[in-house]
Image: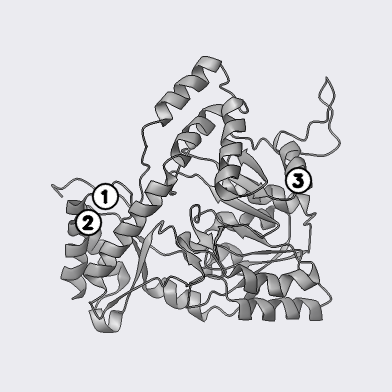
Amino acid sequence: MSESRIFLSPPQMGGEELELVRQAFESNYIAPLGPMVDGFEQDFSDYTGFEHCLALSSGTAAMHLVLRHLGVGEGDVVLASSFTFIGSVSPAVFQNADLRFVDCCPESWNIDPIRLAEAVQECLSEGKTPKAVIPTDLYGQCSDYDAIHEICDPLGIPVIIDAAEALGASYKGRHAGNGGRAAIFSFNGNKIITTSGGGMLASDDAELITHARKLSTQARENFPHYEHIEVGYNYRMSNILAAIGRGQLGILNERVARKKAIFEHYRFELEGLPSISFMPVADYGTANYWLTCILVDPDVAGISYEQVRLALEAENIESRPVWKPMHLQPVFQHCKMYGGQVSEFLFSRGLCLPSGGALSDLQLSRVIETVRNVTA
């Protein structure tokens, strides 16, 4: 392991962040809230096209606030993608909802509208209208929003889009997340832009954002003293982290372009191998290529994706299996699942390759050579 480590998706600074942090320090707005938070929310609104944005401590916090605003409570049905990260769905558990999972489709690896329709119809037959539907925009590619809305809108079911991985992606010409009741984004350290930790709640619903803003600051009422008529949370983003976010957002387009170039390079070099295939890109939008994901066919390669991962690790290269579906997680073994075969198949073969924007051509060659050596 003499070679330096290649990480899966490390943070990458663009150059302006330190100056903006300096300005935040000089203003003495160190704690949550401040001019940088206000500026980050406005910058994010301008970039994505949402009318209202709320900077928070995490994407999970954003999802929790939406469910609180919608009044999701004990026994209410929430339908969500199974092929996702747990932070997308754990807020439904916080609210004691009846969380149910929906399989993905092979065309985009996102929630399957056919399975979603089946799930909604079964809920209705039980006398329950789902309180919310949560599709995840997986690995930087949008779900089929129109197909989802065609199912949900006639029944008044709110669609909350988990766009945590999709900042910079688009669906039919509009930015990821637009069209849902709300969308959530993440700025975790491995995302396409980062504030080290943090998230954004975005919506065109002013009432939703106003209530979420109140809940995020301990639900304090407008009194000179501390007055509370409901319980809230400490979910706001700090002014320092918002300064980093403003610097990161300014170079997002460059980051998306670099991520796409990395994906195309991997595909050019590896797609000819009969044992390797790539996550498909749906023709209804543009991806941000946050992570390049491959499927390893064990029957052709003679080895599993896990053996490929271990071979990469032996060369000091970090890779990671795709998300383990939520319905396979022990903590959710009691939850209803609609379908499951597609996400289980993807999990049995899927691997995320290093996709950091600062990857050099030499580092890419190291990854590619290792994958070729063990799968060809």
- Secondary structure beneath disc 1? loop
User: Which badge, 3 or 2, comes first in the chain's sequence?
Assistant: 3
Q: Nearer the viewer, residue 307 or 238?
A: 238
Q: Which mark is residue 359?
A: 1
Q: Residue at x 70, y 38 (%)?
A: 216
Closest to the camera, between mark 3 and mark 2, is 3
User: In the rendered structure, which amino acid carries the disc numbered 2?
Assistant: Leu
Farthest residue to the left: give it.
2
User: Which badge, 3 or 1, comes first in the chain's sequence?
Assistant: 3
352 with respect to 239 (left or right): left
How many marks can you see? 3
Q: Nearer the viewer, residue 164 or 72?
A: 164
Residue 309 appears at what percent x and percent y? Answer: 28, 63
- In which quadrant of the rendered image does the C terminus lie? bottom left
Quadrant in which residue 172 is drawn? bottom right
Are the residues flagged by discs 3 and 2 in contact, CB closer than 8 Å?
no
Mark 3 = which residue? 206
Mark 2 = which residue? 364
- Secondary structure beneath disc 3? helix
Q: CA distance from mark 3 to mark 1?
A: 40 Å
Quadrant in which residue 214 is drawn? top right
Q: CA distance from mark 3 to mark 2?
A: 45 Å
Residue 328 appears at what percent x and percent y? Answer: 53, 70
Quadrant in which residue 149 is drawn? bottom right
350 with respect to 52 (left or right): left
